[in-house]
Image (tube, helix red, strand yellow):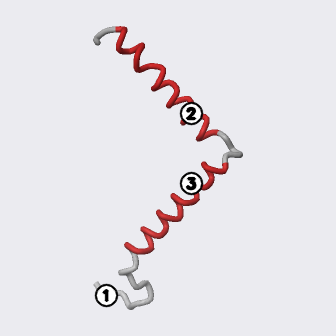
Amino acid sequence: MTGPESKKASSPGVMNWFRSAYRFSTDRNDFRRNLLVNLGLFVAGVWVARNLSDFDLMSPQPVA
């Protein structure tokens, strides 16, 4: 389909997705949102710690 019919067919699904995403992100008492955010921050912290573990901050710095 082309034209207005195709927009009408996909619009309710897209609008429902945006509505649910907005509701999910703005609900302050949502346990799932808090769990996902906390797990995401934890994973990001683990990734940073693993990738920055090659640096030894206590070693003497080279003289330039």
Nearest the eye: 46 or 4: 4
Q: Position of residue 16 (x, y in %)?
A: 52, 27
- In the rendered image, residue 24, in percent from the top left (x then y), is placed at 59, 39
Q: Quadrant of residue 19?
A: top right
Mark before the other along the chain sequence, 3 or 2: 2
Mark linked to residue 37: 3
Amino acid at the residue labelled 3: Val
Number of callouts:
3
Nearer the camera: disc 1 or disc 2 = 2
| Location of mark 2 (residue) | 20
Residue 30 placement (x, y as % from top left): 67, 46
The 10 Å Cα crowd at callout 1, few under 14, some 14 to 19, many 20 or more, is few
Under circle 3, the secondary element is: helix
Residue found at x 45% / y 73% = 49
Q: Nearer the viewer, residue 12 or 29?
A: 12
Query: If you read the primary sequence from the N terminus, does the residue marked by circle 1 or circle 2 appear first?
Result: 2
Q: Nearer the viewer, mark 3 or mark 2?
A: 2
The local secondary structure at tag 2 comes to helix
Q: Residue at x 56, y 33 (%)?
A: 20
Mark 1 element type: loop
Q: Nearer the viewer, residue 8 or 45?
A: 8
Residue drawn at x 63%, y 52% is 34
- Image quarter for residue 56? bottom left
Which residue position holds label 1? Answer: 62
Query: Does 43 sit left or right of 34 as displayed?
Result: left
